[in-house]
């Protein structure tokens, strides 16, 4: 048994099982409603019930007052449909619909993915969730006033923890701390979501993803988001690394390609080592794309990695027919090193 929920003013409609909240049913159907906590504490998901009924199976959420109920308001992160519903609620369509917030977080666990990549799993307070679009990033707010930006590697539907892939940068103060000093359960502050590198879902064009190193992180979130929502768009991931040891968790995109006929994965090593016994593609990752797609006019490209790679890919892809407005990118730059103090003379 399911109920039909219709959104106004968009007119979008989707089914909801009696056990699903209105928010979960909307997200599962690919419609993003605003939310902040998913437990009725913040009121970000508040909207109006035009017709139909809902219930709150646990307790009346604290952000819903008696006056709200009398006015036909509901908190869609907690409300479950007990009939077909017609509701009024804005939908999140662009990054501008989600305001960045500063939040505390706990480093729930650290997992070393390869010799120089560490995954951080960040837990927000129990009454908080970070709403974001697949591909966006957050910034760590450090005690000295500086910031460090890292892409979110998880998809929005999987927001119990935030996933970060941090590469160890020689001489990098923050990443040295992450690898060598940061304890699990460390308390940090972040601001997000930020950035305009996110998956555009209003197109049916096939997508070419180009990742260099940890540029895989936001692309991972994008692909997982698309697959979660049943997207049938053709998606090809080209992932470049120096050698075999620099390509972390390759089994994940291999799994996507094995389970989804619309997904292909092409790893590219620029300088494979003898022990790699590499029989795959070599050279610059964006050159592999150009060799396979001499005409890019019908594609969208999402490109993430070092600035030099992103700039070269942009220039060369446009020369090969890619429409300028169909190139979406995020270039990873590093914080400048602090100058060393010199002794007075």
Image (cartoon, grey):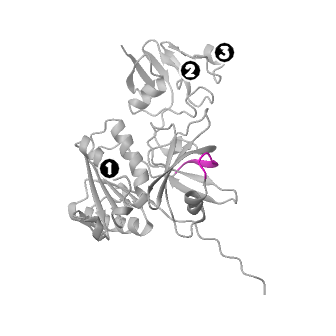
The kind of secondary structure element at disc 2 is: strand
Earlier along the polypeptide chain: callout 2 or callout 1? Answer: 2
Query: Is there any visible trace of residue 51 in the rendered image?
Result: yes
Residue 330 sits inside the magenta stretch: no
Provide the residue designation for mark 2: 74
Query: From mark 2 to mark 3, how far is it between C-alphas?
Result: 11 Å
The residue labelled by disc 1 is 251
Query: What residue is drawn where x is 36% and y is 69%?
Result: 312
- Above or below 280: residue 75: above
| Tag 2–tag 1 contact (CB < 8 Å) | no
Residue 215 relative to residue 70: left or right: left
The answer to which of marks 3 and 1 sits earlier in the sequence is 3
* Viewer-side residue, 164 vs 328: 164
Furthest-front residue in view? 275
Q: Earlier in the sequence, mark 2 or mark 3?
A: 3
Measured Cα–Cα span from mark 3 to mark 1: 52 Å
Q: How many marks?
A: 3
Give the percent coordinates (x, y) of residue 258: 24, 44
Residue at image x 64%, y 24%? Answer: 63
* Label 3 sits on residue: 66
Residue 219, percent from left and from top:
39, 51
Residue 11 sits in quarter: top left
Looking at the image, which is closer to me, 276 or 142?
Answer: 276
Where's the N terminus, which quadrant?
A: top left
């Amino acid at each position: 048994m399911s109920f039909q929920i219709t959104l106004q003013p968009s007119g979008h409609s989707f089914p909801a099982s009696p056990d699903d909240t209105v928010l979960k049913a909307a997200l599962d159907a690919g419609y993003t409603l605003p939310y902040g906590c998913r437990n009725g504490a913040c009121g970000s998901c508040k909207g109006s019930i035009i017709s139909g009924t809902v219930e709150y199976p646990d307790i009346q959420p604290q952000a819903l007052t008696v006056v709200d109920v009398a006015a036909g308001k509901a908190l869609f992160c907690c409300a479950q449909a007990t009939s077909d519903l017609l509701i009024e609620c804005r939908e999140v369509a662009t990054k501008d619909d989600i305001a960045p917030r500063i939040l505390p977080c706990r480093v729930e666990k650290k997992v070393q993915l390869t010799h120089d990549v560490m995954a951080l799993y960040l837990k927000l307070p129990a009454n908080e969730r970070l709403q974001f679009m697949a591909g966006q990033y957050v910034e760590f707010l450090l005690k000295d006033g500086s910031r460090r930006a890292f892409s979110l590697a998880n998809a929005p539907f999987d927001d119990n923890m935030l996933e970060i892939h941090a590469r160890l940068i020689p001489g990098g103060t923050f990443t040295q701390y992450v690898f060598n000093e940061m304890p699990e359960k460390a308390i940090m502050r972040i601001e997000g979501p930020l950035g305009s590198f996110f998956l555009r879902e209003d197109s049916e064009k096939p997508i070419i993803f180009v990742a260099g190193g940890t540029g895989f992180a936001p692309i991972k979130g994008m692909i997982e988001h698309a697959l979660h929502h049943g997207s049938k768009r053709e998606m090809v991931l080209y992932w470049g690394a120096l050698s075999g040891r620099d390509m972390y968790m390759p089994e994940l995109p291999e799994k996507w390609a094995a389970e989804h006929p619309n997904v292909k994965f092409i790893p590219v090593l620029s300088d494979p080592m003898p022990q790699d016994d590499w029989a795959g593609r070599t050279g610059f990752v964006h050159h592999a794309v150009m060799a396979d797609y001499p005409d890019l006019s019908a594609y969208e490209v999402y490109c993430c990695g070092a600035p030099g790679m992103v700039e070269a890919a942009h220039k060369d892809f446009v020369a090969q027919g890619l429409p300028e407005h169909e190139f979406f990118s995020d270039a990873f730059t590093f914080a400048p090193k602090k100058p060393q103090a010199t002794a007075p003379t």
